[in-house]
């Protein structure tokens, strides 16, 4: 792609680093910003900088938060004995949108993937085991994507939890194998949570 400006080219290159954004889409976004008022562009850039500087991760579940404890973990009406284990914040948002789950979450921050150099020690697994060890948890729902990495992670975590006196379940496979939680429609996802099944090997 030929650019008439080095500044334009640099901006397009930065936008195209975002997931799912190719150079043509990046160019459209940059040109759109160029056509906006300076105040609008400043607000846009300041919101990104503020996000990066001030965002926190919940000290209990690992979810993205404005404070050291997220709104879900703080909510008094949530069932703290029920933990839904998810890969990342996008999955928390997807499940919350179903309005069918009243427990709390634990965000792993990824999946075990030896091909990508991601092992158990790089994920938020130890904190999950610590939460279960406290003795107030009655059930852990393994709500991970139905992929090879997801199943590998589920198997590993099940081995970590199987000696605790808790129920370990997995969401029903209304989610197709190879499917990502965040892309499932709300009805399918809600049904998968509601009809979860005990996990065992």
Image: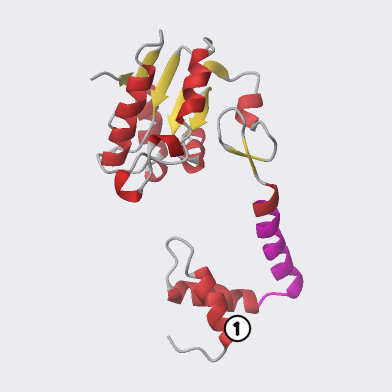
- Residue 48 lies, in percent from the top left, at 65, 58
From this viewpoint, which residue is outermost toward the bottom? 4
* Residue depicted at x 44% and y 34%: 86
Between 131 and 74, the residue placed more toward the observer is 131
In this picture, is 17 found above or below 171?
A: below
Q: Which residue in the protein does label 1 denote? A: 7
Relative to 72, is 103 on the left or the right? left
Q: Is residue 89 visible?
A: yes
Magenta span has 148?
no
Q: Magenta segment range?
A: 35-51
From this viewpoint, which residue is outermost toward the top? 165
Q: Sort mark 1 into few (<14), some (14-19) or many (20+) by Cα contacts within 10 Å.
A: few
Q: Secondary structure at mark 1?
A: helix
* Residue depicted at x 66% and y 31%: 69
Question: In the rendered image, which quarter is residue 141 located in?
Answer: top left
Q: How is the image coloured?
A: secondary structure
Number of numbered discs overlaid on the protein picture:
1
Rendered-image quadrant of the N terminus: bottom left
- Residue 181 lies, in percent from the top left, at 38, 40
* Residue depicted at x 42% and y 43%: 182
- Residue 195 lies, in percent from the top left, at 34, 22
Dominant secondary structure (helix, strand or loop) of the stretch shown in magenta: helix
In this picture, is 145 found above or below 1?
A: above
Relative to 20, is 65 on the left or the right? right
Magenta span has 43?
yes
Rendered-image quadrant of the C terminus: top left
From this viewpoint, which residue is outermost toward the right? 39
Between 176 and 114, the residue placed more toward the observer is 114
- Residue 84 lies, in percent from the top left, at 46, 26
* Residue depicted at x 26% and y 40%: 148
Question: In the rendered image, which quarter is residue 119 located in?
Answer: top left
Q: Is residue 196 visible?
A: no
């Amino acid at each position: 792609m030929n650019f008439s400006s080095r500044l334009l080219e640099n901006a397009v290159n930065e936008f195209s680093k975002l997931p799912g954004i190719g150079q043509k889409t990046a160019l459209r976004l940059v040109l759109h910003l160029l056509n906006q008022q300076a105040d609008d562009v400043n607000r846009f850039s300041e919101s990104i900088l503020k996000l990066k500087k001030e965002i926190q991760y919940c000290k209990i579940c690992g979810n993205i938060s404005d404070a050291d404890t997220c709104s879900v973990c703080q909510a008094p009406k949530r069932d703290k004995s029920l933990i839904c284990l998810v890969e990342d914040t996008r999955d928390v948002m997807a499940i919350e949108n179903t309005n069918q789950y009243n427990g709390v979450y634990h965000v792993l921050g990824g999946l075990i993937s030896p091909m990508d150099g991601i092992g158990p020690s790089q994920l938020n697994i130890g904190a999950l085991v610590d939460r279960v060890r406290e003795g107030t948890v009655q059930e852990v729902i393994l709500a991970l994507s139905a992929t090879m990495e997801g199943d590998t992670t589920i198997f590993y975590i099940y081995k970590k939890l199987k000696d605790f006196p808790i129920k370990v379940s997995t969401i029903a496979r209304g989610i197709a194998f190879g499917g990502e939680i965040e892309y499932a429609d709300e009805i399918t996802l809600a049904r998968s949570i509601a009809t979860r099944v005990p996990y065992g090997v």
